[in-house]
Amino acid sequence: MAVARLADPALAAGWLEALWERRSRRSYDGIALGAEALEALAQHCETFRPFDTARVVLIPSAPQALFLGILGSYGGVSNAPSALAFIGRAGEAGVDAAIGYTGEAAVLEASRLGLATCWIGGLFDPAQGTRLAGARSGERLFAVSPLGHAVDRISMKERVVFGLGRPKRRKDVAEFAPGSDEWPTWARAAAAAVQVAPSAMHRQPWKLRLEEGALVIGCEGLKTPKVSRRLDCGIAMLHAELGALGEGVEGDWELLDGDDVGRFAPR
């Protein structure tokens, strides 16, 4: 299966810039988003569907009850006016990676528009989210993200529960992409972009290798019950592609089976 081209170079450049600056936020100011921002995101969600198994739905008005905390509201999202819902066809081959790739594009588009987000794979109400997103027969809600303007200061909840306000430990590129110091420039740039990709519990489960001129992303390490490693690696796939595009290299993805998730072949 090949991914549709990121046809708008200016848009891809904006996403590449956003991925370096974005950070997950869970405390919001509660102010409803303007019509222009909502329209732009709705248009993105309708038009950017590189896989037929995955889609993103904008929820313009998100009730607080959509987001469940560790103990009720404690540890959860607060005051987010809107949300993104990441939906896929349950049981389809490659759907987790497709969700990660497609969903991260919406997250980066939101960041490009100056909005805050946070991938949430477990602490949400699936029944309510499914209803709000209008999931169809055979579809499942894999994850959600709050959407809005984050409060200016990182809240105590975010500091204590989620460790915001201090640097997170990122794996060295050499750890997940051994030998990459000898890769071509585009592949090194792809690996650097993967290094800052978000993942469940910050586990960073990706493993990269260069094989016959193509970049292969596989998964390894900690498994969690709510979010598959393949979804995380789907997020990493988009980051890798954007990194390569930053060096002028376009390509296509093929979804793989087993511990390998995707293969990016430059054109």
Image (cartoon, grey):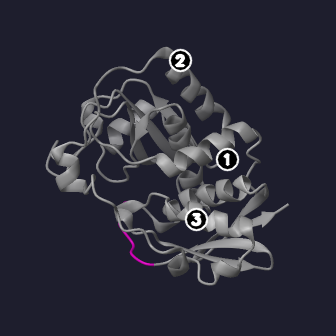
Position of 251 with respect to 135 (left or right) is: right
Q: Amino acid at mark 3?
A: Ala
Residue 42: name its quadrant.
top right
Q: Nearer the viewer, residue 24 or 180?
A: 180
Magenta residue check for 84 = no
**Quick check: marks 3 and 1 in contact, CB under 8 Å?**
no
Query: Residue 133 location, x and y as percent?
Result: 45, 33
The range drawn in magenta is: 221-226
| Residue 207 spot, x, y in % from top left | 56, 76
Q: Amino acid at mark 2?
A: Glu
Image spot of residue 59 (x, y percent): 44, 29
* Residue at the extreme top of the image, as rendered: 35
Q: Which of the two labelled residues, at mark 3 and mark 1, occupies the earlier sequence position? A: 1
Could you tell me how far apart the alpha carbons at marks 3 and 1 are, in whole angstroms?
29 Å
Q: Which residue position holds label 2?
A: 36
Q: Residue at x 26, y 38 (%)?
A: 27
The answer to whether residue 78 is above or below residue 214 is above
Give the secondary structure at mark 3.
helix
* Badge 2: residue crowd in 10 Å (few <14, some 14–19, many ≥20): few
Cα–Cα span, label 2 and label 1: 27 Å
The amino acid type found where label 1 is placed reads: Asp
User: How dense is the environment of label 3, judged by Cα within 10 Å: few (below 14), some, or many (20 and up)?
Assistant: many
Mark 2 / mark 3, whichever is N-terminal: 2
Do callouts 2 and 1 mark residues in contact (Cβ within 8 Å)? Answer: no
Residue 29 horizontal/vertical position (percent): 28, 27
Find disc 3 in the rendering and name its residue: 192
Q: Please indicate, yes or no, whether residue 103 appears anywhere in the rendered image.
A: no
Looking at the image, is mark 2 or mark 1 earlier in the sequence? Answer: 2
Residue corresponding to mark 1: 52
